[in-house]
Image (cartoon, rainbow, N blue to C red):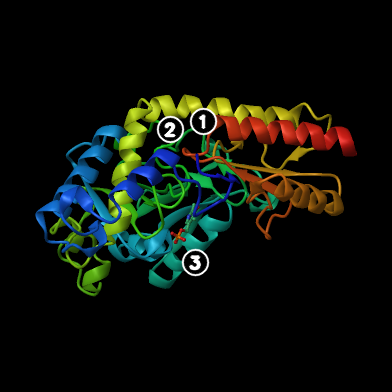
């Protein structure tokens, strides 16, 4: 088998080996077409089949009702920071944001360029080491929407439950780093968006799940490419789509299906991350988790050691042992293990053992 790194990258991140191998098999000659999927017209029957099947798989695996559009866009989640307010923020109706960390801050910054905003809750005073209590979230009755970041990739926090919103206030979620990692009631949301490169495939395609009644075809000043109705009306084929990325998401979704679907993955993720959280919690303070207990992420495990020297040494030794991507984001420091869907249980076990061994040698 290929020499595979112990990949804990935050994004782009590990893909299932089976998916990579299948893509490799089909890379040069896709289903005897005499060409790769990348060389085909996006109007061809073969690509249309991939596009339709990918959407159908996503609907089935995530339980997305017919009352929602599923769109495959470009520009990453960062473009959605602008597209959401451009399409949903109405004059005189503020967009409310829950401030949970680095990504929520970037989302708010873009919304402020478009219209009126308000902060519904914030954990900034705690350095974003927790998700605000749901009961502390204040949403104006006339809000255009409430925006949350379901998993803060950099701080390593995750909503355990989602906030309730007043009637007529859609809940909008940036799920870039936890989409399809656990079961979700889609009906709670007006709009969900996520770049694919953490849980669903390579970079290049952004998934948007949006309730049909929120998609307006009468926006006056929004450029064509930045309107949801443009892409909804054309099955995400208004212009040339990121066809190879969509194809890779297709293979990844089939892999998720083969693993028993989202519920099975949720359990798998919980079991594998417990190994690493246990290594932190049972270390007697040698490792300290960054996120408060009730806010811990199952996707990004952030932790610190007593000194920065020790953290540097941990990062260096881990690299020598074949681990990749454990250095924390520069804004938080410390260490971070990203444990997305495709990160194998056995790699998490190997990391937990390395942590215990490192502690024995340095504790
Ligand atoms: C990675 C990430 C983003 C940015 O995604 P891009 O595709 O690089 O624009 C936004 N939000 C969250 C929560 C992320 O993890």
The image quarter containing residue 345 is top right
The image quarter containing residue 265 is top left
First-in-chain label (1 vs 3): 3
Q: Residue at x 36, y 52 (%)?
A: 145
Between circles 3 and 2, the one closer to the viewer is 2
Between the residue at mark 1 and the residue at mark 3, the CA separation in whole angstroms equals: 32 Å
First-in-chain label (3 vs 2): 3
Labels 2 & 1 near each other (Cβ < 8 A) = yes
Whether residue 167 is visible here, answered yes or no, is yes
Q: Nearer the viewer, residue 162 or 353?
A: 353
Where in the figure is residue 330, as x and y percent of width and height? 68, 60
Q: Residue at x 54, y 60 (%)?
A: 105
Q: Which residue is identified by label 1?
A: 269
First-in-chain label (2 vs 1): 2
**Disc number for residue 109:** 3
Q: Which residue is identified by label 2?
A: 182
Between circles 1 and 3, the one closer to the viewer is 1
């Amino acid at each position: 088998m290929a020499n595979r790194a112990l990949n804990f990258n935050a994004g782009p991140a590990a893909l299932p080996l089976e998916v990579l191998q299948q893509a490799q098999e089909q890379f040069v000659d896709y289903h005897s077409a005499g060409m790769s999927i990348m060389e085909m017209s996006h109007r061809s029957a073969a690509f249309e089949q991939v596009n339709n099947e990918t959407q159908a798989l996503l609907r089935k695996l995530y339980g997305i009702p017919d009352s929602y559009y599923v769109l495959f866009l470009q520009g990453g989640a960062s473009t959605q920071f602008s597209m959401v307010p451009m399409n949903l923020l109405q004059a005189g109706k503020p967009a409310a944001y829950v401030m949970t960390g680095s990504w929520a801050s970037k989302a708010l910054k873009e919304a402020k360029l478009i219209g009126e905003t308000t902060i519904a809750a914030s954990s900034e005073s705690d350095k974003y080491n927790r998700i605000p209590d749901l009961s502390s979230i204040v949403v104006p009755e006339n809000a255009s929407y409430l925006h949350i970041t379901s998993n803060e990739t950099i701080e390593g926090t995750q909503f355990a439950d989602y906030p309730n919103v007043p009637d007529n206030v859609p809940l909008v979620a940036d799920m870039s780093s936890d989409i399809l990692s656990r079961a979700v009631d889609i009906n709670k949301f007006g709009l969900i968006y996520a770049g694919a490169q953490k849980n669903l495939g390579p970079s290049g395609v952004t998934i948007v799940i949006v309730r049909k009644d929120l998609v307006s075809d009468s926006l006056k000043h929004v450029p064509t490419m930045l309107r949801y109705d443009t892409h909804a009306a054309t099955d995400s084929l208004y212009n040339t789509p990121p066809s190879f990325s969509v194809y890779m998401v297709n293979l990844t979704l089939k892999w998720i299906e083969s693993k028993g679907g989202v519920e099975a993955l949720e359990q798998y993720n919980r079991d594998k991350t417990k190994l690493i959280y246990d290594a932190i919690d049972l270390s007697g303070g040698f490792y300290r988790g960054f996120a408060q207990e009730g806010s811990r992420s199952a996707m990004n495990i952030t932790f610190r050691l007593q000194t920065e020297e020790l953290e540097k040494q941990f990062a260096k030794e881990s690299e020598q042992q074949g681990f990749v991507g454990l250095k924390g984001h520069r804004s938080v420091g410390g260490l971070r293990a990203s444990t997305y869907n495709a990160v194998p249980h056995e790699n998490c076990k190997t990391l937990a053992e390395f942590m215990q061994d490192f502690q024995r040698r340095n504790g």
